[in-house]
Amino acid sequence: MFSFKEKIKMSLIKNNIKDEQNPFILFKNWYKKAKSNEISNPNAMALSTVGSFNKPRTRMVLMKEIREDGIVFFTNSNSRKGKHIVKNKNVSLNFYWKSIERQVLISGKIKKISSKDSDKYFRSRNRKSQIGAWTSKQSQILKNKSDLKTRFDDFEIKFQGKEIPRPKHWYGYCVYPDCFEFWLEGDGRLHDRLEYKLKSGQWIKKLLYP
């Protein structure tokens, strides 16, 4: 009989996956492979937040940084997701890479990153995206598209010939995971599922039934 740890290693070796103790290392390896194979936006991830009456809501956002202990994206803090985050710090992320038949499900707590780091990333955006951050009243009702275009034109004139500052309502957020699940498609729907859970500062691995 094989031990649980041996079964995990056998499954990973069979699918050419290195047995990492730190899920961030495995995640970075998978993301590197996705970037080489996924046609568009391998950094796209489904972000789920919980709003009023415990109702979840999911939307696609773009990962912009993988830190040693978290995953960063940027958004308007006045948006629906921003308001959800204020009330409930528990979120989940899901990456699905069809081209390599893999997905990663992540859950954890979310927190704003520093103003300094948010400023730095904002300055790296192209000018139209910077103006767009000022233009959009994200998640509010838009009567017609021409209103959006008018607001964009107004801000374009306002900042003409000037450096565009980061709007105070536009921030980076970091998700600090306490659970990773790595999923690899298998024949006959016998998929591989490897779960990492953070307990007392240590990552505990388990192999799950598909």
Image (cartoon, grey):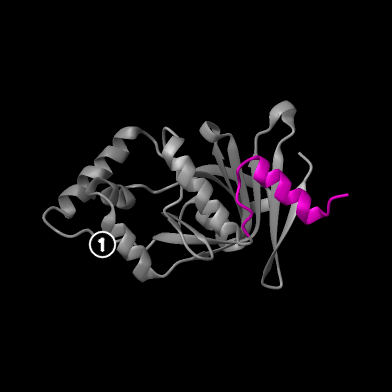
User: Mark 1: few, some, or many residues within 10 Å (few <14, many ≥20)?
Assistant: few
| The C terminus - image quarter | top right
In magenta segment, residue 95: no
Name the residue at 48% across, 42% down: 33
Question: In this rendering, would 149 be left or right of 139?
Answer: left
Question: In this rendering, would 148 be left or right of 198?
Answer: left
Q: Residue furthest left?
A: 161
Q: Position of residue 90 (x, y in %)?
A: 64, 59
Q: Which residue type does callout 1 highlight? A: Pro
Q: Position of residue 141 (x, y in %)?
A: 44, 41
Count of numbered circles in the view: 1
* Residue 179 versus residue 39 in the image, above or below: below
Q: Provide the secondary structure element on which disc 1 rests.
A: loop
In magenta segment, residue 19: yes
Q: Residue furthest right?
A: 1
Q: Residue furthest bottom?
A: 200
Question: In this rendering, would 80 be left or right of 7?
Answer: left
Q: Residue furthest top?
A: 188
- Hey, which quadrant is residue 39 in on the image? top left
Depth check, front residue: 6 or 209:
6
Name the residue at 70% across, 28% down: 187
Q: Position of residue 130 (x, y in %)?
A: 28, 52
Depth check, front residue: 48 or 132:
48
The residue indicated by pointer 1 is 165
Question: In this rendering, would 196 be left or right of 16?
Answer: right
Depth check, front residue: 96 or 87:
96
Name the residue at 27% across, 56% down: 124
* Residue 93 versus residue 144 in the image, above or below: below
Name the residue at 31% across, 40% down: 148
- Looking at the image, can residue 140 be seen? yes
- Looking at the image, can residue 50 be seen? no
The magenta region covers: 1-20
